[in-house]
Structures are given as C-alpha cells and as structure tokens.
Amino acid sequence: MPAQQAPTGDDRPQPSLWERLDRPAAAPRTTLTPHRIAEAAVAIADAEGLDAVTMRRLATALGVAPMAAYRYVSGKDELIELMVDFVYGRLPLDTPSDGWREAMRSLAVHLRAMSLTHPWLARAATPFSLSPNQLAVPERAFAALAGHGPDADTTMAIFRTVTGYVHGSVSAEITLDTQRRDRGWSAGDETRAALAPRMSYLMGTGRYPAYQQYLQQATRKDDPAWHFETGLDCVLDGIAAHFGI
C-alpha cells in the first residue's frame, strides 16, 4: 500500500521509501533500524491483525519515542510496505533447483507457507506495493524459465498462473479457518459434527450420490497441504504439456 507522493516544487515525485533507505541521511547514533521497525510491526500484525499496527503502538513495542520511526517511514502506508518487504525477504529463493518446474513448485509451496504464517498479507501486499524483496519473486521465476522456450509475455502468464493458484488456494484456506474460529469450531471432526444435521438431510435427498461417495471414501479431508500440492502439480503438469517444456 504505497503512500501517495506529493510533487516537489519542481514537479518531480519524491523519492520512494526504497530509494530513501538505499541512501539514508546521516543521523545520530541510534539502535532503531528499518529491520527492527519491520520486525516489531510484523509481530504485532501476526498476533493481533493489521489494524492493530499503529505508529504509537509500534513505538511502545520498540521502546522509543512516538516520532522515532518517522525518520524511516512517513506513516502507516510506508510502514506496511516495510512489513511486506520484510516478510518477503524471508522467502528461501536461492535454493538450488533441478529445473523450472522444481523452482516454480518450491516457490509456490514457500509462498503458501508465508501467507498462512502472515494472513494479513492478503490485505497488505497489493499489486502496487512494489518492494525489493517482492520483485525478487518474479526475478527468481523468470530466471528459472529462461532458456526453456517461453517468450517474455508467456513467461509472465506462467508466473501469474502459478501465483494465482497460490493466492486463490491460500485465500480459501484462510477464509475457512477464520470462519471456523468465529464459530468456535476446530478443524476436522468438530466441524463435521457441527454440520452433520444439514449434511445428513442433504445426502438423504439422494440428489448428490457422487458427493456422498466422496464423503464416504475420502481419507485426506483434513490435509490441506496435500490438496494444495496436488492441485499445484496439476497446474504445473498443464503448463509443461501446453508449452512442451
């Protein structure tokens, strides 16, 4: 969520957060750093949600004056940019890979894990919140696909297909978990028990024999990682078959 930048007197846009952090102005000795700011803000968001992150709350968590963080960020919008970049910076993108498929699969699995660990990212990481560590993700994917035939536009389409699958699957997973918690249900048998009266009626109508067969035979109902990775393999198999790579 980048902040709107007001034009300077000569009508040129102000430097972005990342440009300013790459060439910080000289300052008195301090223990406060962008890394510390981001780490503390992420901890608050992970525990209490994105709305709990305020500049005052952050200052309290860091044990600094309320205005101290403003040396690095102009307000909450830039703070959220810093948080998103910090989280993306923890993705293991430099793991050796045997090929494009393995690289894309590894990337997708790590993106899912990151998003589940930090569910507030769904709100914070917009398509316009460009940051150094976010751009490292398509850089890794494009490099993995280079030399396998796809042109520039096709490479982007493949990347968006894989990441679109990740975002859609993770969003559904987070929504389901949130709705369960809101109802006081744990995953698995407790949820099924709560839904049993309605499900029993619907299955008793005889209108859904294929779904009833699934309910009776499925053994991985409570294994979201398996469902995610199976769907991911289908996506990657489709890409490989369609483009012959």
Image (cartoon, grey):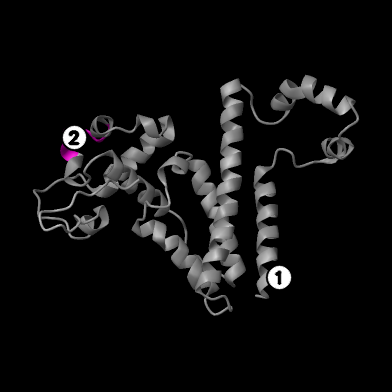
- Tell me: residue 131, above or below residue 205: below
In percent of the image, x 65 and y 49: which residue is there?
228
Name of the residue lying farthest toward the front: 11
Quadrant including the C terminus? bottom right
Between 121 and 43, the one lying in front of the other is: 121
Q: Position of residue 66 (x, y in %)?
A: 18, 32
Q: Which label number is shown at residue 6?
A: none
Residue topped by disc 1: 241
Quadrant including the N terminus? top left
In percent of the image, x 54 and y 80: which residue is there?
147
Asked whether residue 94 appears in the rendered view, the answer is no
Q: Is residue 198 magenta?
A: no
In terms of sequence position, does the residue under pointer 2 or pointer 1 come before the other?
A: 2
Q: Position of residue 151 (x, y in %)?
A: 53, 76
Three-letter code for the amino acid on which mark 2 is drawn: Val
Between 154 and 7, the one lying in front of the other is: 7
Q: Residues within 10 Å of mark 1 (few under 14, many from 20)?
A: few
Q: Residues within 10 Å of mark 2 (few under 14, many from 20)?
A: some
Q: Is residue 28 left or right of residue 202?
A: left
Three-letter code for the amino acid on which mark 1 is drawn: Ala
Residue 63 quadrant? top left
Between 85 and 243, the one lying in front of the other is: 243
Circles 2 and 1: CB atoms closer than 8 Å: no
Residue topped by disc 2: 64
Residue 136 quadrant? bottom left
In percent of the image, x 57 and y 44: which residue is there?
170
Q: SS class of the residue under badge 2? A: loop
- Tell me: residue 7, above or below residue 156: above
Q: Position of residue 176 (x, y in %)?
A: 61, 34
**Magenta range:** 61-68
Q: Main secondary structure of the magenta part?
A: loop
